[in-house]
Amino acid sequence: MKSKIIIFTFFLSLPLISMAQSPSVDDEITLIQSAFGMEKQALVRQYMDLPDSRSQAFWSIYQQYEEERRSIARERLKIINDYLENYETLDEVMLDELAKRRLKVDASRVKLHSKYYKRFKKATNATDAAKFLQLDDYIHSTISVVLLESLPFIGEI
């Protein structure tokens, strides 16, 4: 399972590396999120392996969760794009703005997990809710590592 996620993440992240040259960042993000959403749902479905008695409630909440998560992810991708587009001219003001935006996105993701853990737990049980959050964290962390490995450090170039 982990190898599937790592391979999927690698191929998913390839368009992000060249996002700065893309004529429409919003279109690129929409395309990435669409492909990622379908693949992620298949991974979640396989990993969760829910019985019919809990499946319908879980997937209804999952769709709501994904809608909110996508808006947070969209902002994160915009931050990365802004970083790449402005890398050569980054100054104190830009770096401060990017860092604050990143912290806000991170806080939004934690808040989203807290909100939806309660909803998943109520609709299914604590085990299913925790299992989903663990998988979601793993996927997010894997994507983050791949993205960070492809980004230049501040002052590197």
Image: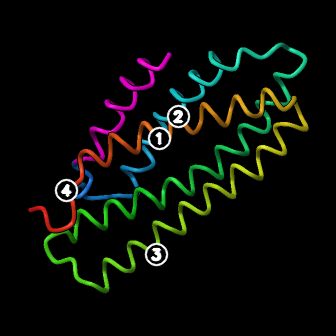
User: What's under tag 1, amino acid-wise?
Assistant: Ser
Left or right: 156 in relation to 42:
left
Nearer to the camera, 113 or 72 = 113
Residue positioned 41% across, 18% down in the render: 3
Which x, y percent locates residue 63? 71, 39
Left or right: 53 in relation to 96:
right
Number of numbered discs present?
4
Do the residues bearing badges 1 and 2 touch, measured as CB atoms within 8 Å? yes
- Mark 1 crowd level (few <14, some 14–19, many ≥20, 10 Å Cα): few
Left or right: 120 in relation to 84:
right
Q: Quadrant of residue 37?
A: top right
> Is disc 1 placed on a helix, strand or loop?
helix
Q: Is residue 98 magenta?
A: no
Q: Which of marks 1 and 4 is nearer the N terminus?
A: 1
Residue positioned 38% across, 64% down in the render: 79
Which x, y percent locates residue 47? 63, 18
Residue located beneath label 2 in the image: 138
Numbered badge on residue 141 = 1
Instruction: Report the Cα–Cα distance between label 3 and label 4.
Output: 19 Å
Instruction: Report the Cα–Cα distance between label 1 and label 2.
Output: 5 Å
Q: Earlier in the sequence, mark 3 or mark 4?
A: 3
Q: Which of marks 4 and 2 is nearer the N terminus?
A: 2
Do the residues bearing badges 1 and 3 touch, measured as CB atoms within 8 Å? no
Residue positioned 15% across, 68% down in the render: 155
Q: Is residue 13 above or below residue 6?
A: below
Left or right: 74 in relation to 93:
right
> Is disc 3 placed on a helix, strand or loop?
helix
Q: In which quarter of the image is the C terminus?
A: bottom left
Numbered badge on residue 152 = 4
User: What's under tag 2, amino acid-wise?
Assistant: Tyr
Instruction: Report the Cα–Cα distance between label 1 and label 4.
Output: 18 Å
Residue located beneath label 3 in the image: 100
